[in-house]
Amino acid sequence: MKQDIFYYPLMKIGIIGGGQLGKMMTQQAKKMGFYVTVLDPTPGSPAGQVADKQIVGDFYNEQKLRELVNESDVTTYDIEHINTEALKQLENEGHHILPSPRLLEIIQDKLKQKEALTKKKIPVPRYEKVETPDPAFFEKFGFPLVQKARKGGYDGRGVVVLRNKANLENAIKAESFIEEFVDFEKELAVIVARNTAGETRCYPVVEMVFDERANICDLVIAPARITKEVEEQAKEIAVNCVEILDGVGVFGVELFLTREGQVLVNEIAPRPHNSGHYTIEACVTCQFEQHIRAISGLPLGSTKLLTPAAMINLLGEGSGKPVIEKLRQILSIPGLSFHLYGKSTTKPFRKMGHVTIVDENLERAIEKAEKVKKTFKIKGMTG
Ligand SMILES: Nc1ncnc2c1ncn2[C@@H]1O[C@H](COP(=O)(O)OP(=O)(O)OP(=O)(O)O)[C@@H](O)[C@H]1O
Ligand SMILES: [Mg+2]
C-alpha cells in the first residue's frame, strides 16, 4: 500500500491557462491545501488572481512551459491550444503532465480525435476528411453538412453549417473535415473523471442548450430529461471514450441524442467543462476538485447529484470594461449562486461568469434561469 503521509502544501500544481476553468480548479486546489502556479499571457488572469503565483507567458512559449513544469509536481491545463511538442519533451524528461500530452495531441486535432473514436467503434456522426475543397466533393457527401476546422476551434468558432451549394462561399479554408448535419433532439454532456489508478466516476447526464446567434452553450440542465435507457447509454459511451484515450483527469464528453434515440459523440474536452459548472453547488464533489484529485493520484469523490440545477452562462453584450446590470435583482432569486470570473474587459459573447440555480423542482430551476437570462446583463463601457 502507498504511504499515506503528506506535508503542507500537499503538492505543487501547475496550470497552463488562467481562464475561468483554471480559476475554479485553483480555488478547489487551494481549498484542499495545494500550492498552485498558473501560466497565462494576461497579468492578473482570473486564475492568477487566486493562485499562489502566476507566470506571465504564452502557451506556446517553451521556456515558460519549462519554468512552470519545473516548479510543479504535476502540471495540467484548462485549454487545449497549447504547445504539445514542448510538453511531450518535458514529459520525456520525467515531468508529470496530465492528461498526457499524447492524448492532448489527439484531441487538439478534431479529425484525429474522430478517427481514434471510430477505431474503437464509438458511435459518431458520419464524417469525411476534406482533401480537395471543390463543390463536387461537398455535393457528393450531401447537404446539409457541418464543416469543422481540424485545429484551433472553440466556442463554435471553426464550425460552419453548410445547408446547400450556395453556402460554400462560407466554407472553411483551413485543414478541415465535414460531417453529417445531425438533426438532434437534444445535446447532452457527461463529465467523466478517471484517476492515475484507472478508477472512473461519471457525473449525471445533462442537457446543453445553445444560443443560436453565436452557437455557444448558454443553458445547462441537470439532470437531463431523458429515459433511463438513454442515460445508461450516454454514460457507458462517455466512460468508454475516456478509457480508450487512457485519460487521467476530468473530461467533458459532448453528445448528440438523435430523434431516433441514438447517442453519438460530438467531441471530448480534456479538462473540466462548461457543462459541469453546476457540480459546484449540486454535487457532493465538484468537477474541479475531482480533477485535482484525479491528476494528483488521490481517490475520487462522490459524483452524486444532491439537487436538480440549471446553469446559465453570463455572456458579454458589449465591449470594454464590464458594466453589470440587475445584480441585486437576480441575487434575490432563491437558490441562485453567482460567479463572476474577474475578466477586466468584456466582448460580445465572451464568457464573463455564470449562475447556477438549485431547486428541488427542475422546471422551476429552468424558469429562474430564463428569468436571469432576460434581466441580467453584462455590457461594456469603452474609454
Ligand atoms: N454534426 C453536427 N450536426 C449538428 N450540429 C452540430 C454538429 N456538429 C456541431 N454542431 C453544433 O455546433 C456546436 C459546436 O460544435 P463543436 O462542439 O464541434 O465545436 P466547438 O467550437 O469545439 O464547440 P465548444 O467549444 O462550444 O464545445 C455543437 O455543440 C452543436 O450545437
Ligand atoms: Mg463543442
Image (tube, rainbow, N blue to C red):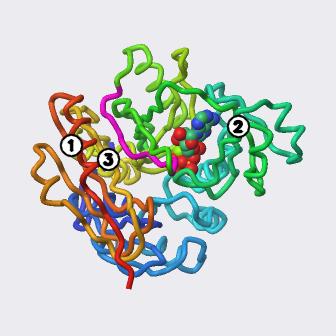
Q: Residue at x 29, y 60 (%)?
A: 377
Q: Nearer the viewer, residue 330 or 294?
A: 330
Residue bearing the label numbered 3: 312
Q: Residue at x 84, y 34 (%)?
A: 139
Q: Residues within 10 Å of mark 3 (few under 14, many from 20)?
A: many
Query: Which element is circle 3 on?
Result: strand
Res. 122 image quadrant = top right
Relative to 37, does residue 3 appear above or below in the rendering? above
Q: Amino acid at mark 1?
A: Ile
Return the disc, 1 or 2, that comes first in the chain's sequence: 2
Residue 234 x %, y %? 46, 25
Residue 284 x %, y %? 21, 39
Q: Nearer the viewer, residue 139 or 206?
A: 139
Res. 331 image quadrant = bottom left
Q: Residue furthest bottom?
A: 383
The segment highlighted magenta reads 214-224
